[in-house]
Image: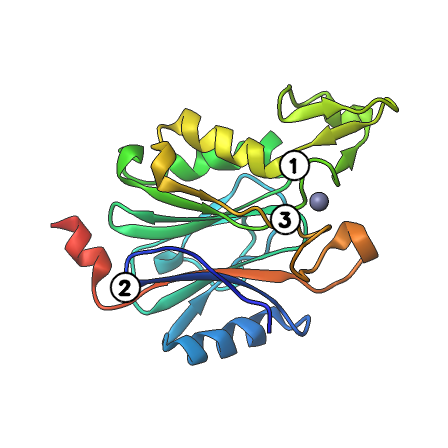
C-alpha cells in the first residue's frame, strides 16, 4: 500500500494515502480506527474560502479548510491534483484544500485569520499535488496568477505550480522556512501511484490526514 508519512512530533499523526473507494466517510473512518482515533472530521470541498471549526460544525458541511482543537479527532482532506496543506502548532491542527479557485477565493487568508496570530510557531505540510510541469491552465485562469508560480512554455501554454504557490503563501503569512515540509510527489507524474483527476478523470481521491493524540494541543497552550 502506498502511504506517505510526514516528519511530525510524536503525538501528531500525519500522512497521505490514496483512497481505495469513493466512500470518503468510510475511508476516513477505517483510517481513524487503524490509527487509534475516536472521531473523524472532514468537509464537503467546494473550492471556496470557507473555514470550518470542527467543534461547532457538522461533518461534511460545505467548506475548504478546517481548524480543530480536539485531541482524538482525525481530520481528512481529499485531493486528486489540488494541494492539501496540513497545519499544526499553537494549540490547533487544521487543513486547507486549494486548487486555483481556492487561491482565488483566498482560502489561506481566511484560514490564518481564524487562528491565533503567530505563524512563526506553526508548522505546515504541503502534501502531494499536481506539479507545475503537469498542470496546464487556460489563459483565463492564468490571469489570476503571477510568475514564478505561473510560467509559460515555449508552445505558449500556461502552467501553474500549485505546491510552489502554497509554499510562497505560507512564507508570506510568516511561516519559518524550516517549519514547512514540501512534498516532492506529483499526483500526475509520480513517482508514487497517487490519484490524479487530470490524468484519468478518476473519482477517487488521496486522503491527507492529521490528528493529535495524548494532549499535544493542551501542552502547547500552556
Ligand atoms: Zn507532475
Q: Which residue is mark 3?
A: 46
- Residue 75 in the image: x percent, y percent? 44, 61
**In the figure, is residue 119 to the left or right of 133?**
left
Above or below: residue 149 compared with residue 34: above
The residue positioned farthest toward the right in the image shown:
155
Above or below: residue 82 compared with residue 209: above
Structural distance between the alpha carbons of marks 2 and 3: 31 Å
Disc with the residue nearer the chain's start (3 vs 1)? 3
Instruction: Residue at 60%, 50% (x, y): give it.
Output: 185
In which quarter of the view is residue 148 placed? top right
Residue 162 appears in the figure: yes
Structural distance between the alpha carbons of marks 3 and 1: 9 Å
Image-quarter location of ligand 1: top right
**In the figure, is residue 178 to the left or right of 60?**
left
Q: Circle 2 — which element?
A: loop
Tell me: is circle 1 under 8 Å from ligand 1: no
Above or below: residue 118 compared with residue 93: above
| Res 11 label | 2
Q: Circle 3 — which element?
A: loop
Instruction: Residue at 77%, 61% (x, y): give it.
Output: 202
Badge 2 crowding class, 10 Å Cα cut-off, few under 14, some 14 to 19, many 20 or more, is some
Residue 113 appears in the figure: no
Structural distance between the alpha carbons of marks 2 and 1: 33 Å
- Residue 43 in the image: x percent, y percent? 53, 57
Disc with the residue nearer the chain's start (2 vs 1)? 2
Contact (Cβ within 8 Å) of mark 2 with mark 3: no
Amino acid at each position: 500500500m502506498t502511504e506517505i508519512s510526514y516528519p511530525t512530533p510524536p503525538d501528531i499523526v500525519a500522512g497521505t494515502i490514496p483512497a481505495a473507494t469513493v466512500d470518503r466517510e468510510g475511508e476516513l473512518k477505517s483510517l481513524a480506527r487503524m490509527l487509534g482515533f475516536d472521531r473523524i472530521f472532514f468537509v464537503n470541498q467546494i473550492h471556496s474560502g470557507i473555514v470550518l471549526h470542527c467543534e461547532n460544525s457538522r461533518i461534511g458541511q460545505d467548506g475548504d479548510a478546517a481548524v480543530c482543537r480536539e485531541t482524538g479527532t482525525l481530520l481528512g482532506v481529499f485531493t486528486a491534483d489540488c494541494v492539501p496543506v496540513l497545519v499544526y502548532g499553537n494549540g490547533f491542527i487544521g487543513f486547507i484544500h486549494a486548487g486555483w479557485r481556492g487561491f482565488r477565493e483566498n482560502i489561506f487568508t481566511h484560514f490564518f485569520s481564524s487562528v491565533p496570530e503567530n505563524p512563526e510557531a506553526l508548522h505546515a505540510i504541503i502534501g502531494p499535488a499536481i506539479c507545475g510541469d503537469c498542470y496546464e491552465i487556460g489563459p483565463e485562469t492564468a490571469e489570476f496568477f503571477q510568475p514564478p508560480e505561473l510560467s509559460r512554455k515555449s508552445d505558449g501554454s500556461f502552467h501553474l505550480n500549485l505546491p510552489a504557490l502554497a509554499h510562497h503563501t505560507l512564507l508570506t503569512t510568516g511561516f519559518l522556512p524550516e517549519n514547512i515540509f514540501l512534498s516532492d510527489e506529483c499526483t500526475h507524474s509520480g513517482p508514487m501511484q497517487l490519484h490524479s483527476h487530470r490524468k484519468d478523470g478518476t473519482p477517487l481521491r488521496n486522503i491527507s490526514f492529521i490528528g493529535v493524540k495524548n494532549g499535544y494541543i493542551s501542552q502547547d497552550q500552556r
